[in-house]
Amino acid sequence: MFFGPRRFWGDNPFKSSYEAVIIGGGVHGLATAYYLARDHGLTDVAVIERRYIGYGGAGRNTAIVRANQRTPENVRLYSEGLKLWPELIDELDFNLMFFDCGNLNLAHSEAGMGAFRLQVATAQFMGVRSELLDAKQCQELVPLLDISDRPKYPILGGMYHPPGGTVRHDAVVWGLARGAWARGVHIHQQTEVTGIDTADGRVTGVRTTRGNIRTPKVLIATGAYGAQTARLVGIRLPIQVLTIQAMVSQPLKPFLHHVVSSGTYHCYCHQSLKGELVTGAHMDPWPNYTTQVTAEYLKHQAEALTDLMPALKSLKFMRIWSGLADMTPDMAPIIDGNDPVEGLYLDCGWGYFGFKSGPITGRYLARFMVEECCPDILQPFSLKRYRENRLMGEISTPPNYGPWN
């Protein structure tokens, strides 16, 4: 039997008007389009993507999902997001390879353990499974961890979050695109938005390299390019873009059954279902839009991994890539709408958390765009929190990067 190539979605005519236009063909844009069609019957929707869907952050991450953030507002959103994956697999009829293997974050100081106590308390208060472990319990989860005094930063304990895990990022993009297109959404790739038109304080359309589109609703979901896209309508966003790198090793026999990370080493890793070790976290400490990889990162990651797990010293890496993280000062996203331009919606500033939150945010954004009333769960992430000095304080790391330092 011959199995030829099969397209998950087809081409549609480029129309001069749509009821809604979504700029950005990543997880957030496609999820919003999918839920606009599925939950609200709004199918006259165009997704405009400058390159191809999944080209940006949606395909340039390490596929980790979790809900062990620091603030209750974030924990609530990410927890709903975690619960959504199995449901999404069923309704999309697409194997997203969700693996709830659990996340283990390592602490190397009393200050680190103190921060984890706060996060665990928040998670448990919000009904999310999370617990503190000592060093021996960490090694029981990951036997290759060296919990002696030899490492540069000895392991004192950890925060274990059983519901977290990994999801295949390419599958998420393809599944959502197929689901949205099957419900009538038009996906226009290789199309760049060059302008957003307004009149009397309202959105009236977008200009693209394939022609103009009239529309009363526009969502900016362009990942690292959110601030640039918002400038098309004169909105300045407090976002700085940094390069983040990752790499994949040769396949190994299964040995790592959890996602393990260390903020002190600035390193995390997990083993894919194919046996590869997927590792990342290094960020260039200056704002830039390059996706080039560096020898400095290779050295950093090799030193960090082998200090934590000396048995990996003979490991060989096969490929390396980088993506862009759109960082806000409080490490929380900007999700807003109708402020200051009616009909304009923002979904940006996710830093390196964007993949984890895509489908759940898309579902609530779709409701926001249809009902024109921000759902309660998204209200803490409004743009005006910066004008009112109400930063969310997710973590203290972002000020160490870029111009905030």
Image (cartoon, grey):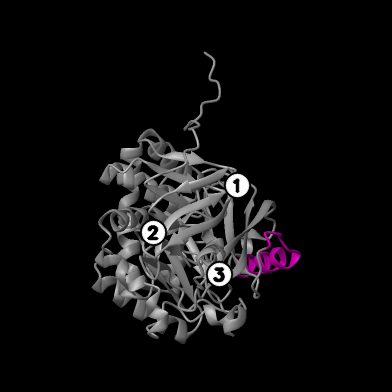
Instruction: Look at 49% across and 71% down and name the residue there.
Output: 235
Q: Where is residue 2 in the image (x, y as percent from the top left)?
A: 54, 15
- Check if residue 84 falls in the magenta segment: no
Q: Which badge, 2 or 1, comes first in the chain's sequence?
A: 2
For this rendering, which residue is in front, 370 or 25? 370
Q: Tell me the magenta residue range.
A: 290-307
Instruction: Look at 59% across and 78% down and name the residue there.
Output: 401
Circle 2 sits in a helix, a strand or a loop, which is it? loop
Q: Where is residue 170 in the image (x, y as percent from the top left)?
A: 51, 44
Q: How crowded is mark 1: few (under 14 residues within 10 Å), some or many (20 or more)?
A: few
Instruction: Look at mark 3 in the image and give the residue it sits on.
Output: 146
Q: For residue 344, which quarter of the picture? A: bottom left
Name which residue type carries label 3. Asp
Q: Which badge, 2 or 3, comes first in the chain's sequence?
A: 3
Q: Where is residue 77 in the image (x, y as percent from the top left)?
A: 32, 64
Q: Residues within 10 Å of mark 3 (few under 14, many from 20)?
A: many
| Magenta-colored segment: predominant secondary structure | helix
Q: How crowded is mark 2: few (under 14 residues within 10 Å), some or many (20 or more)?
A: many
Instruction: Look at mark 2 in the image and give the residue it sits on.
Output: 164
